[in-house]
Image (cartoon, helix red, strand yellow):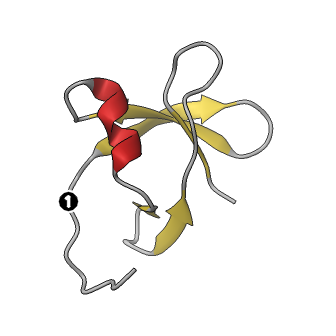
Amino acid sequence: MNDSGHRILLGRVIGALGLRGEVRIESCTAPRDAIFRYQPWTLLDAQGIPSPASGPPAARGDIAADKS
């Protein structure tokens, strides 16, 4: 992937999920599972430092990302 610094907001982290560093994501896409068409994801922490993330929907239907 060519990271030219251009990013779009696809969703936001709304909570923790599980014990392996997964997070719940509120999708800004329509339909909400269309967020999985946009891979890889980059999560930004409170200081704006990026980290890669990806993942499928969780078993309960939540959207989850593994921050590994």
Residue at 27% in and 47% down? 10
Classed neighbour count for the residue bearing mark 1: other residues with Cα under 10 Å, few (<14), some (14–19), many (≥20): few
Residue 40 at x, y percent in the picture: 45, 62
What amino acid does circle 1 point to? Ile
Residue 31 at x, y percent in the picture: 24, 24
Residue at 37% in and 71% down? 48
The image quarter containing residue 42 is bottom left
Residue toward you, 36 or 13: 36
Which residue is denoted by mark 1 in the rendering?
8
Relative to residue 63, is residue 41 depicted above or below? below
The image quarter containing residue 33 is top left
Q: Residue furthest top?
A: 60
Relative to residue 17, is residue 22 depicted above or below? below
Residue at 69% in and 60% down? 68
Residue 4 at x, y percent in the picture: 25, 87
Q: Residue furthest right?
A: 19
Residue toward you, 67 or 40: 40
Residue toward you, 65 or 1: 1
Secondary structure at badge 1 equals loop
Residue at 51% in and 21% down? 62
Q: What count of labels does the image hold?
A: 1
Residue 15 at x, y percent in the picture: 52, 32
Q: Quadrant of the N terminus?
A: bottom left
Residue 24 is left or right of residue 28, and the answer is right
